[in-house]
Amino acid sequence: MLITISAGDPLIEVACPPITWFKANESHPSLTRLSDPPPSGVPLWRGNPAVLVEKLSRADRSTTISYFKIGTDIHIAQITTDMQVPTITLPKIDGERRLHNPILLVHGIMDTSRKMRHISKYLHDLGWEVFDIDLVPNNGDTRLELLAQQVAILVDRIAPHQPIDLLGFSMGGLVTRYYLQRLGGIDRVQRFITISTPHNGTIAAHFSMRPACIQMRPNSDFIRDLNSDVDRLNLLNFTSLWTPFDLIILPPSSSQLGIGTEMQIPALTHPMMVSDRRTFKAISDALSHPVRSPT
């Protein structure tokens, strides 16, 4: 079945799978796919919702959509029996409306998903469906290949049948690169952003003997392996953001790969790269850029 979405002009038709549950939050009106149905007794319609409508709380109230408020959440679903294909008309919104891929944020060493909270909120407020991950362990005691497997498992769970975009900070950029280049992620991901990632290693990694740190040293086997076919990243939209003032990625130019889009953000420290509004703007621009056409 097709859901026809009108956000001014033109009309967009989106194919949706049957019997799916979604939730939208009142304060951040974007949709989240639920892995399980809501609790029993909740008065919801069950069926094929207009899953890709951004900021759904701004949509015109229609007889084909039911809103049920529970606490601060609004649960939405749509009847999909032998009815006509419904049309959802949205009010005119300034700027171009886009239907975004979900995005997964991957933190760096000694960090957790909380490190990415500012980026997450910024994108969430703009209408993206944002996911994060807590890599375990996060202190370098595990090889990066094993952390990349955690990313692969989560991607399969949150976006089993659709493309996804990835963002990795610092070590998280190398973890996601391994997922892309060695675990088949290149076929699942359309946009890939790294922030202050030691693509060519960092001298600072010599201060630790932990396995992941050894892998992040310049000219390590891990770095040389990933860089041996780095051109594969040209199959997707790749963006690298870095600061020349980085004292963790040494030299700071190690964050440059010479492919894709590279942008210098003059944040004063490595950690400030994930809280700088110039970084936020660069991220949203990169995620909004049309996907590279296959050659």
Image (cartoon, rainbow, N blue to C red):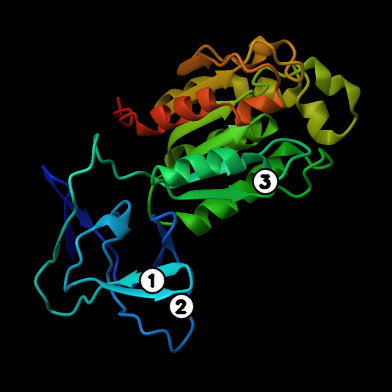
In which quadrant is the N terminus drawn? bottom left
Q: Amino acid at mark 3?
A: Arg
Secondary structure beneath disc 1?
strand
Residue at image position (63%, 32%) is 169
Is residue 159 visible to the viewer in this orientation of the structure? yes
Secondary structure beneath disc 3?
helix
Nearer-N-terminus badge (2/1): 2
Q: Nearer the viewer, mark 2 or mark 1?
A: 1
Q: Which residue is mark 1?
A: 75
Distance (Cα) linking label 2 and label 1:
9 Å
Is residue 183 visible to the viewer in this orientation of the structure? no
Instruction: From the viewer's perspective, tell me whether residue 135 is left or right of residue 211.
Output: left
Q: Position of residue 285 (x, y in %)?
A: 39, 27
Q: Residues within 10 Å of mark 3 (few under 14, many from 20)?
A: few
Q: Which residue is mark 2?
A: 38
Instruction: From the viewer's perspective, tell me whether residue 183 is left or right of residue 129.
Output: right
Q: Residues within 10 Å of mark 1 (few under 14, many from 20)?
A: many
Residue at image position (54%, 36%) is 167
Q: Is residue 198 above or below residue 75?
A: above
- Check whether the beta carbons of the residues at disc 2 and disc 1 lie within 8 A of each other: yes
Nearer-N-terminus badge (2/3): 2
Q: Is residue 241 above or below residue 44?
A: above
Q: Position of residue 114 (x, y in %)?
A: 67, 46
Q: Amino acid at mark 2?
A: Pro
Q: Is residue 215 above or below residue 13?
A: above
Residue at image position (64%, 21%) is 199
The one of 185 and 35 positioned closer to us in this rendering? 35
Q: Position of residue 178 (x, y in %)?
A: 61, 35
- Residue 114: give its label: 3
